Amino acid sequence: EMGPWILRMVEAKLGTPKFDALLKDWYQSHREKAVSTEDFVAFTKAKTGTDLATFFKEWNSITAVPKLDGTVSLAGEKATVSLEAAAKVPSGIEVPLLLEGTAGQQKTVMVKIGEPLVIDAGFKVKKFQWDPERTVLAFVH
C-alpha cells in the first residue's frame, strides 16, 4: 500500500506544521463522509495554496516503487552527483542528499533525476546518504 508514503511525501512538500494542520482540518470537516482523492486535492489547494493534482496523478499511475541509480563522487569539498531512473517514474522527483563533513558539518541538497550537478559543500566531505529522513518513495542504489 502506497497511501502512507504518498502522505509522507505531501508532508515533506508542505512542511510538518502545515501538513499537521491540514490533516486536522481535513479530518474535522470530512469525518464519516465518503471522499475521493480529488476531494483531498481540492481541499489542500484551498487550505494551503498548493495544487497537488499533478503530483497525485503521477504517483497514482505507478505500479511499483521507483528504482533510482544514484552516483556520488567525493573529492575534497566537492561532490559530483547524478540520479537516473531505470524505468519511467513520476515527473518532478527530487531526492535529498545529505553530505557530511569530517568535523560533523552537514549540507542537504535536492537532486533531480537526469540533472547531474557538482556541489561545493564548503567543507571536506567524508560521507553521504540519500534521503536520510525517508521523504521520497523510491529505492536509491
Image: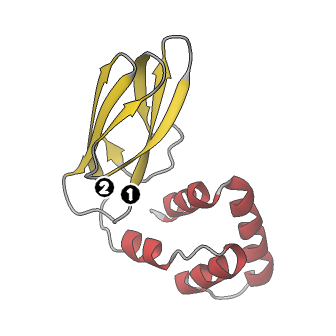
Residue under numbered circle 1: 93
**First in sequence: mark 1 vs mark 2:** 2
In this view, 106 is above or below 89? above
Instruction: Name the residue located 56 percent from the left edge and 16 percent from the top edge.
Output: 104
Q: Residues within 10 Å of mark 2 (few under 14, many from 20)?
A: some
Q: Position of residue 1 (x, y in %)?
A: 45, 63
Task: Inspect the image, locate mark 2, and give the three-letter code of the amino acid beneath it.
Answer: Pro
Q: Position of residue 77 (x, y in %)?
A: 40, 20
Q: Quadrant of the C terminus?
A: top left
Element under disc 1: loop
Residue 20 vs residue 99, the one in the foreground: 99
Q: Residue furthest top?
A: 103
Residue 21 vs residue 46, the one in the foreground: 46
Q: Residues within 10 Å of mark 1 (few under 14, many from 20)?
A: some
Element under disc 2: loop
Residue under numbered circle 2: 66
Task: Inspect the image, locate mark 1, and give the three-letter code of the amino acid beneath it.
Answer: Ile
In this view, 130 is above or below 76? below
